[in-house]
């Protein structure tokens, strides 16, 4: 049986009134909460804290699956990275084993040749470590001052090294400090060997960042990337000290990029190789 039309109309009117009442009630509740928040902030803070305390466990439980998934993904990524690093380390280990066997073979061959030629071994060097106290370089000079002098065994003409290679040589030695002439100074002249062929030349500084090669027989014999080391001529430097590599070959000359960056020098080693070069010869004392 169908309900009377009047009853349906009453239900519709009642529903509309309830919706309007609920809307107005929400608006009134909102204004009431705003007024309470302005009037009694302590009460609002307590209510907020209570709601936070009640919701926090729920949020914690909901966040645990996401955290577990994130940890699982991170573990997979770390595992993949570890496997890749393990493969690289295996390759490096294999290469190092090859180099080790080659080095052992060369060492045995070197000892055999030394025994055959009755080669007199070179004296071992003594080292003094010092800190760079000042950089006195400028447009007309390239030198540094180190915190070691004659009291530590530092003498004029001794070789100064850093971790990467040759820095320069001692030009003046006081009691507790010394001045080092850098290889980039315009007064620096170093006999060197260039490339695997060992072409002889003179490394000359020009107060710039890159010294140049002089008296190189054929410029085509030098190519970018060729290593430059000391030759040991004139007993100014021992042979084989690394200096840098050829950076550019042009008509004006051959430029060399030093291994040691001047601005990054903090500590140096002053080496005494027992050389008798010109710089190592001290003038006689006058009475």
Image: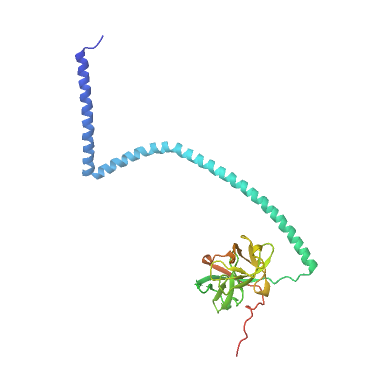
Count of marks placed on residues: 0
Eyeballing the image, is 56 above or below 181? above
Q: Residue furthest front?
A: 251
Q: To which quarter of the image does residue 167 belong? A: bottom right
Of the 4 image quadrants, the one containing the C terminus is: bottom right
Residue pictured at 62% horizontal, 49% vertical: 89
Colouring method of the image: rainbow
Question: Percent position (x, y) of residue 206?
Answer: 55, 71
Determine if residue 274 is in view. no
- Say whether residue 47 is left or right of residue 260: left
Question: Percent position (x, y) of residue 110?
Answer: 75, 63
**Nearer to us in this view, 53 or 133:** 133
Question: Percent position (x, y) of residue 219?
Answer: 64, 65
Determine if residue 200 is in view. yes
Residue pictured at 54% horizontal, 41% vertical: 76
Eyeballing the image, is 96 above or below 82? below
**Nearer to us in this view, 203 or 215:** 215
Q: To which quarter of the image does residue 158 belong? A: bottom right
Of the 4 image quadrants, the one containing the N terminus is: top left
Residue pictured at 71% horizontal, 58% vertical: 103
Question: Percent position (x, y) of residue 15?
Answer: 23, 22
Eyeballing the image, is 79 above or below 153? above
**Nearer to us in this view, 212 or 163:** 212
Q: Residue furthest right?
A: 116
């Amino acid at each position: 049986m169908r309900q009377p039309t009047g009853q349906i109309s009453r239900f519709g009117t009642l529903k509309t009134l309830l919706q309007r009442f609920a809307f107005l009630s929400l608006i009134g509740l909102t204004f009431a909460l705003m007024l309470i928040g302005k009037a009694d902030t302590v009460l609002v803070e307590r209510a907020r804290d209570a709601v936070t305390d009640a919701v926090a466990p729920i949020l914690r439980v909901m966040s645990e699956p996401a955290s577990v998934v994130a940890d699982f993904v991170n573990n997979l990524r770390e595992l993949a990275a570890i496997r890749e690093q393990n493969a690289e380390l295996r390759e490096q280990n294999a290469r190092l084993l090859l180099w080790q066997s080659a080095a052992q073979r060369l060492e045995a061959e070197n000892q055999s040749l030394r025994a055959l030629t009755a080669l007199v071994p070179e004296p071992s060097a003594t080292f003094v470590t010092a800190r760079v106290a000042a950089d006195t370089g400028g447009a007309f000079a390239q030198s540094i001052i180190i915190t070691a002098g004659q009291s530590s065994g530092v003498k004029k003409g001794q070789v100064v090294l850093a971790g990467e290679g040759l820095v320069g040589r001692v030009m003046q030695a006081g009691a507790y400090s010394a001045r080092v002439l850098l290889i980039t100074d315009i007064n620096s002249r170093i006999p060197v060997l260039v490339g695997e062929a060992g072409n002889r030349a003179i490394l000359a500084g020009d107060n710039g960042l890159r010294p140049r090669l002089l008296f190189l027989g054929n410029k085509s014999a030098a190519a970018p990337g060729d290593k430059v080391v000391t030759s040991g001529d004139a007993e100014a430097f021992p042979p084989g000290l690394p200096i840098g590599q050829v950076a550019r070959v042009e008509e004006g000359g051959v430029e060399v990029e030093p291994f040691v960056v001047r601005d990054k020098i903090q500590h140096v080693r002053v080496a005494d190789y027992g050389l008798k070069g010109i710089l190592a010869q001290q003038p006689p004392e006058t009475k």
